[in-house]
Image (cartoon, helix red, strand yellow):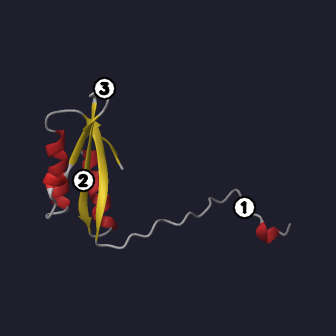
Amino acid sequence: MSDDKLRDLRQPAQAAAPKIDFPCDYPIKVVGDASEDFTAVVCQVVSRHDPGFDATAIEVVESRTARFLSVRLTLRATGEPQLKALFSELKATGRVHMVV
């Protein structure tokens, strides 16, 4: 086997990031502790990053034990900086466990 076919295991493999063509409709799921106002908090944050966000189109799913809520929504993504800022603000609420 020639040396050019061996991969140097000390170097991380370069995975190609998925290509997203902006602007686009971008689905996300926000998971946090169940509370009466969790959905409203998520919608307020998303609305700051997407003024045209339609909060009537969200889907809220309670966990089996009713301890967590999953808020599924679609926003209009304009670029990677917008998404990073949105994810950071959601996490900064202290109420969000995960954004997928």
Q: Secondary structure at mark 3?
A: loop
Residue in the picture at 28% in, 72% down = 23
Q: Secondary structure at mark 1?
A: loop
For residue 65, which numbered disc appears in the image? 3
- Front label number (2 vs 1): 2
- Distance between the alpha carbons at the discs numbered 1 and 3: 46 Å
Task: Name the residue type under label 1.
Answer: Asp
Question: Which quadrant of the structure image shows residue 10?
Answer: bottom right
Q: Earlier in the sequence, mark 2 or mark 3?
A: 3
Task: Name the residue type under label 3.
Answer: Thr
Would residue 53 be found to the left or right of residue 3 on screen?
Answer: left
- Front label number (1 vs 3): 3
Vertical order, 89 against 37 (above or below): below
Question: Which quadrant of the structure image shows residue 68?
Answer: top left
Q: Which residue is mark 2?
A: 73
Q: Earlier in the sequence, mark 1 or mark 3?
A: 1
Extreme residue toward the right, this view: 1
Would residue 66 be found to the left or right of residue 39 on screen?
Answer: right
The reply to whether callout 2 and callout 1 are in contact (CB within 8 Å) is no
Q: Secondary structure at mark 2?
A: strand
Q: Which residue is mark 1?
A: 8
The spot of residue 11 in percent (x, y) is 66, 60
User: 44 and 56: which one is in front?
Assistant: 56
The spot of residue 30 in percent (x, y) is 29, 46
The spot of residue 72 in percent (x, y) is 26, 49
Residue in the picture at 28% in, 59% down = 85
Badge 2 local density, few (<14 within 10 Å), some, or many (20+)?
A: many
